[in-house]
Amino acid sequence: MFDSLSDRLGGVFDRLRGRGALTEADVRQAMREVRVALLEADVALPVARQFVDEATEKAIGQNVLRSVTPGQQVVKIVHDALIAMLGGDDPQAAELKIDVTPPAVVMMVGLQGSGKTTTTAKIAKRLSGGQMGRDRKKVLMASLDVNRPNAQEQLATLGKQVDVQTLPIVAGQQPVEIARRALQAAKLQGFDVLMLDTAGRLHVDQALMDEMKAVAEIATPQEILLVVDSLTGQDAVNVAQSFSDQVPLTGVVLTRMDGDARGGAALSMRAVTGKPIKFAGVGEKMDALEAFHAERVAGRILGMGDVVSLVEKAAESIQQEDAERMAAKLAKGQFDMDDLRGQLAQMRRMGGLGALAGMMPGMKKAQQAMANGAVDERILLRMDAMITSMTQKERSKPELINAKRKIRIAKGSGTTVQDVNKLLKMHQEMSTAMKKIRKMGGIKGMLAMLG
Ligand code: GDP
Ligand code: MG
């Protein structure tokens, strides 16, 4: 079996426990392990490369939380980046765009044996049972697979099993003709959804692609779902690319997630098609279909147990410590430049989520701007540099900072007097707000607000 990624990184990083920021060298070393883990999980090479580059950038310069190891923290960063790249945990991902003038057309494409026919019936079952959207849908299924012997019969059998109608089989018809007939039947007989199950080949070939394009042209589907076996390893990228080049895919279904696939194909799919993974097939039975969970798959790719929640807890507890320290100062009516600096550092660390940041007028703007991507962390670093250029006296008594001192601080920090003024104004606004909070309910009130 695989060593979990966190074990491996633990070895690399244990000596660094609690040593401040993650240096570039630390991160690069860890990311080499991450890359191996991704490849072991069957993530395609170019996708793994791109992912590691992005995650490296995110990790460099992050502060190491006191109670976790840098290795654990890197795992968490990678885990979060994986979830983001897998499309987050969007509850709407599993919805199909079928609220159109009926019939809505859902077309299934993919290689032979990927699970198209099975998935067609599984989705039809859900739709007709009212498990997708609010209403039960009247669904018609049609198999356009004239290559594989008995393929149309296979769908008819599944249809009986899930109690969904299938288009009567007419021997000798070609896929485009069957699609036309299916559309007409769906319109005339008032079906809400028409599901088209198409033929696949063992390998991507042009005849398959042409047939698929011709069907898509006449059926104008609302959804074209690419069905991919999650055990497809490095080839997943090529499969996704070829299909996505030929027809406008709207989503992906990953089958055989019940097997020992480590989920790497999911990452490759998403990276290449840019489309949401809507469902995961988790068995041969007709109800073995689930909404796709990015979180679960990210965990599977990294094989990392509960590292993520550990890091989350550590981050929380540090926030709590900071809040308590701040509360103690507030009780004495103090809020000096060092406190401001602590808040800035926390904003950087938490990506704009410092414990007090959201409550502060000056900070709130900065925080929102950061969330919008309008301000990057360089601005926070510049503020930090200005405070560093102050003397200890100036930090605890900012009112000492006159014009002459401002010039010195600006020079020392590579900023302008205007920048220094802005910082002082922000501090002023924050300490006023602090005083208000104290009046409003003191420490207890504030901690309650911090939740
Ligand atoms: P098609 O050629 O793309 O239409 O593939 P089929 O739907 O005929 O599926 C091929 C085989 O894979 C069948 O034996 C299915 O029962 C099986 N299969 C499909 N989806 C899953 C899944 O999610 N898990 C498992 N274990 N088997 C599946
Ligand atoms: Mg089939």
Image (cartoon, helix red, strand yellow):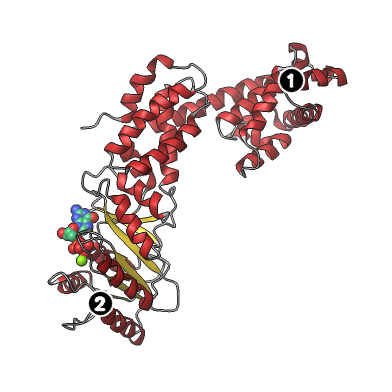
Residue at image mark 2: 175
Circle 2: residue type: Pro
**Pick the front one: 46 or 183:** 46
Question: Measuring 36% from the left and 84% from the top, which residue is drawn there?
Answer: 187
Nearer to the camera, 239 or 125: 239
The residue at 81%/26% (across/down) is: 417
Residue 331 visible in the shown view: no
Q: Quadrant of residue 240?
A: bottom left
Q: How many marks?
A: 2
Q: Quadrant of residue 376?
A: top right
- Give the CA distance from mark 1 to mark 2: 77 Å
> x, y (%) of residue 239?
30, 55
Q: In the shown orientation, is residue 19 left or right of residue 220?
A: right
Q: Is residue 250 above or below residue 182?
A: above
Q: Which residue is mark 1?
A: 334
Q: Considering the numbered disc 1 on the image, is that residue within a helix, a strand or a loop? A: loop
Q: Amino acid at mark 1?
A: Gln
Q: Is residue 416 left or right of residue 165?
A: right
**In the orientation shown, which residue stands out farthest toward the front?**
206
Assign ligand 1 to one image quadrant.
Answer: bottom left
Q: Quadrant of the N terminus?
A: top left
